[in-house]
Amino acid sequence: MSDLDKFESKVKASLETDVQNLDAVTRKQLATARRKALNQPQKTTWLPAWFKKDYWLPASSLALCSLLAVFILVNPSPHSKPDNVANTQAVQQQSDQLAALELLDGGDDADAPDDPDFYLWANEMLNDKGTPNAA
């Protein structure tokens, strides 16, 4: 016999003698506590509760909404490719920048006429500097 087996047999013998030396009141209290512990209802987990008939509709609607959200977020629409979206955004930024530069460069040209004949007349006037009453 090994040392471990000797130790186990000594502990068993000691415990058995202690149990036999217990008085009747303590034995009765221990037996009552044991019966009470064994008769406890089993604790149920949350998973079997979801398998009841009342939870099928909310659970299935939650699953359907989650599935639709995944499809909408993961699958882009076929008309908008990522490179087209990037190009569209770049073109929009360029047009915004050009509009801003036009405003800074000559945004207050309301005095300049848009009539091409005006420019021809102004050119004639500049060429006629030597004549009297020239501008």
Image (cartoon, helix red, strand yellow):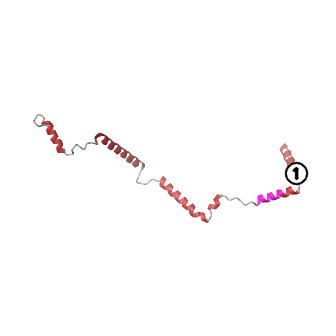
Magenta residues? 29-39
Q: What residue type is labelled 1?
A: Asp
Q: Which residue lies furthest to the front in this view?
A: 133
Magenta portion: prevailing SS class: helix
Nearest the eye: 48 or 22: 22
For mark 1, what is the residue? 18
Residue at position x 53%, y 60% in the image: 64
Q: In this view, does 35 lie above or below 84?
A: below
Residue 105 at what x, y percent from top left?
A: 29, 40
Label 1 secondary element: helix
- What is the quadrant of the C terminus in the image? top left
Q: How crowded is mark 1: few (under 14 residues within 10 Å), some or many (20 or more)?
A: few
Give the image location of residue 26, x and y in percent: 85, 55
The picture places residue 88, in percent across and down from the top left corner, at: 38, 48
37 left or right, relative to 90: right
Q: Residue at x 56, y 61 (%)?
A: 60
Q: Does the magenta stretch include residue 1?
A: no
* Residue visible at 65% across and 61% down in the picture: 48
User: In the displayed structure, does residue 112 sit left or right of residue 33?
Assistant: left
Closest to the observer, 16 or 82: 16
